[in-house]
Image: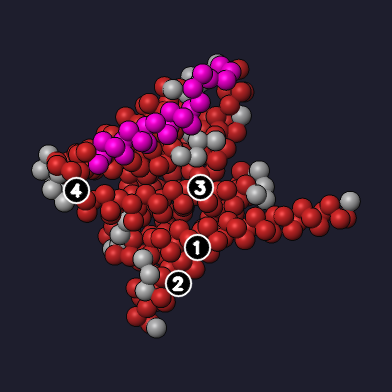
């Protein structure tokens, strides 16, 4: 059992580092209604990493990360420029996000077909390698996320206004697309750093499910973030414990644990509403 606990500690700490950043960003994503932007940016980053492989570079090298950041930044630019600031757009923003995801996925498959170890790279991008995360990786990730977090803290009023009160920002004449690009760029940085370790599926889950769980119970920003972090910690710990206990793939088990948590939270919410209706 002590050995089991020692093996669990690095993946759990890595999950908490991810949650600290992605749980917060998820509040913005849910509020903006661009749920699949994470998948699209993650796929753009994966396309960059695969392209680096095709050009003879290691996907985990500095050059590989530069390619991943570059493609994710291109995606951030597309999302910022295509956001409508005047009424209902002819093409919904979510549709554009979906198109970027599909095209990036198809391009990744084409590049991977010609790149050495392309198939393995795609598999790792989906499932991640969080079980084998090391302390140096966690430290680098924490430092990078601290920088991204400081950036968001400095611009928190701008970002939260755009996410929660878009109409106000437009009426006051803000350069919405510019601020959107800054948001999506920082978002892309966080996603690009997360995908090689956690994988696309787990990153999407960490981003969306804790925030969705929190939105079931409150709209207050601070409480949203606190509930996101707390629920994610519980689900990550439960997923890791089940994974180690039954020798199951870690990332998918954690994803299922988050799904179970959201279902339980939904039932609690229904119970609360039913109780309130009976009292009234």
Which residue is drawn at the image coordinates 74% and 58% (left, top)?
Answer: 271
Q: Quadrant of residue 53?
A: top left
Q: Position of residue 256 (x, y in %)?
A: 48, 61
Q: Is residue 228 left or right of 137 when viewed as pictured?
A: right
In three-dimensional space, the C-alpha distance between marks 3 and 1, rounded to whole angstroms, equals 14 Å
Q: Quadrant of residue 78?
A: top left
Residue of label 1? 257
Q: Earlier in the sequence, mark 2 or mark 1?
A: 2
Label 4 crowding class (10 Å Cα cut-off): few <14, some 14-19, many 20+? many
Residue of label 3? 208
Residue of label 4? 118
Is residue 21 rendered magenta in the image? no
Q: Earlier in the sequence, mark 3 or mark 2?
A: 3
Tell me the element at label 4: helix
The residue at the far bottom in this view is: 1
Look at the numbered discs 2 and 1 and tell me whether their residues touch, using CB distance below 8 Å: yes
Residue of label 2? 242
Magenta span: predominant SS is: helix
In three-dimensional space, the C-alpha distance between marks 2 and 1, rounded to whole angstroms, equals 9 Å
Q: Position of residue 15 (x, y in %)?
A: 42, 59
The magenta stretch spans which residues? Answer: 86-109
Q: Earlier in the sequence, mark 4 or mark 3?
A: 4
In three-dimensional space, the C-alpha distance between marks 4 and 3, rounded to whole angstroms, equals 28 Å
């Amino acid at each position: 059992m002590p050995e089991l606990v020692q093996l669990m500690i690095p993946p759990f700490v890595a999950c908490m580092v991810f949650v600290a950043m992605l749980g917060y960003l998820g509040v913005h994503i849910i509020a903006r209604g661009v749920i699949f932007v994470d998948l699209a940016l993650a796929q753009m980053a994966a396309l960059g990493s695969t392209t680096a492989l095709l050009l003879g570079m290691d996907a985990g090298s500095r050059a590989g990360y530069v390619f991943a950041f570059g493609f994710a930044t291109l995606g951030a630019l597309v999302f910022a420029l295509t956001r409508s600031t005047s009424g209902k757009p002819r093409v919904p923003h979510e549709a554009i996000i979906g198109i970027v995801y599909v095209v990036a996925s198809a391009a990744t498959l084409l590049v991977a077909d010609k790149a050495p170890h392309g198939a393995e790279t795609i598999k790792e991008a989906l499932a991640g390698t969080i079980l084998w995360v090391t302390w140096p990786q966690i430290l680098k990730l924490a430092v990078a996320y601290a920088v991204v977090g400081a950036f968001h803290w400095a611009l928190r009023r701008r970002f939260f206004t755009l996410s929660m009160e878009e109409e106000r920002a437009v009426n006051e004449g803000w350069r919405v697309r510019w601020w959107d690009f800054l948001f999506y760029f920082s978002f892309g940085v966080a996603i690009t750093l997360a995908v090689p370790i956690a994988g696309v599926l787990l990153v999407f889950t960490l981003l969306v499910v804790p925030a969705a769980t929190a939105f079931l119970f409150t709209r207050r920003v601070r409480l949203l973030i606190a509930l996101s972090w707390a629920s994610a910690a519980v689900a990550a710990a439960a997923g890791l414990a089940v994974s180690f206990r039954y020798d199951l793939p870690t990332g998918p088990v954690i994803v299922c644990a988050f799904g179970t948590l959201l279902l339980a939270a939904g039932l609690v919410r229904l119970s609360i509403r039913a109780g309130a209706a009976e009292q009234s």
